[in-house]
Image: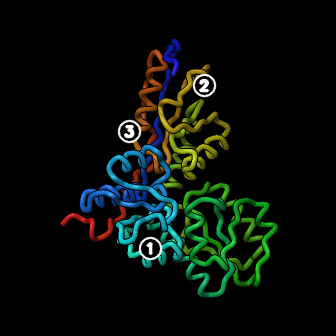
Amino acid sequence: MDLKKPSETIELVLASPRGFCAGVDRAITIVEKALQKYGSPIYVQHEIVHNKHVVQRLRERGAIFVENINEIPLGSRAIYSAHGVSPVVRKIAEKRKLKVLDATCPLVTKVHGEAQRYAQKDFTIILIGHHKHVEVQGTVGEAPERIIVVGNLGEVQKLVVQDENKVGYITQTTLSLDDTAEIISALKKRFPKIQSPAKNDICYATQNRQNAVKALSKEVDLVIVVGAPNSSNSVRLLEVAKSTGVKARRIESEQELNPNWFKGIKRIGVTAGASAPEDILQGVVSGLKKIFSSSQVRDLKIVQENVTFALPAVLRSD
């Protein structure tokens, strides 16, 4: 990184809330406490959350990450990632006599339950989400013969269902609120009797972070989103920022900062996806301070989050 300092003062505005949500915090804590209680190795089905820094830190402590449940040795301790898994994966784990801890985000579990209820009523289930995302794959597994994944407006127009009077929709939890609203509106036009979830599937943290980015974008010349390229909620934050007309970039860490981005920039907004650690974001802030001759930092607080999710009973402190 070129540390030649521009002469101007920069203002850094940090979005709040940002970074870890309750589901991510719970999932990481489950792996940490399992390693403390049982020792290594602990096998984790998929990355516990989509962030290479988090995964590497847990790997160094003894966690082993696998994509296929069959890679886990018979009888071993295993953890499902925050994104959830399908019933098929659970059955394989049972057959392999794995000692499983479930780190699935409770809000993802809620969506799985909705899919099950629709399936029991013989509904066609429209799952709004990204086809290859691991959370979507796990949800589809709840009723693969009944779920159709829709990722954009064009796919809505191509939908063919068995009975237009028996259709319901659910959504991936980490989508853009605005994009999802457009797809839901199109679905309601196609299927006037379509049933919706009792409560919005997009998680509270996703909504809060997107709202914070919209507010942040009004006050700065450039938004930097800290998060991994495979983190759906981080990519959505980038899209939300760009949709407001502000310049925006996504990076994973301080090392990716480029001084050439900041010519003519007076105010920089910084936020982080729900799986990005705060220390990585603070590293980005430190990197920005190194680039400029002087800087001012302030928080832009939109809402206070106080949500927590309980750990599995075997990991709770006495």
- Up-down relation of residue 39 to residue 102 (above or below): above
Amino acid type of the residue that numbered disc 2 sits on in the rendered structure: Trp
Q: Is residue 302 visible?
A: no
* Residue drawn at (65%, 69%) of the image: 127
Which circle marks residue 159 in the picture? none
Residue tagged 3: 279
Residue tagged 1: 93
| Marks 1 and 2, the one that precedes in the sequence | 1
Residue 221: x and y in percent read 59, 30
Q: Is residue 166 visible?
A: yes
* Residue drawn at (42%, 60%) of the image: 44
Q: Nearer the viewer, mark 1 or mark 3?
A: 1
The residue at the far bottom in this view is: 121
Q: Nearer the viewer, mark 1 or mark 2?
A: 1
* Residue drawn at (60%, 49%) of the image: 236
| Marks 2 and 3, the one that precedes in the sequence | 2
Q: How many neighbours does mark 2 have within 10 angstroms: few (below 14), some (14-19), or many (20 or more)?
A: few
Secondary structure category for the residue under label 2: helix
Q: How many neighbours does mark 3 have within 10 angstroms: few (below 14), some (14-19), or many (20 or more)?
A: few
Label 2 and label 3: CA atoms lie apart by 22 Å
Label 1 and label 3: CA atoms lie apart by 35 Å
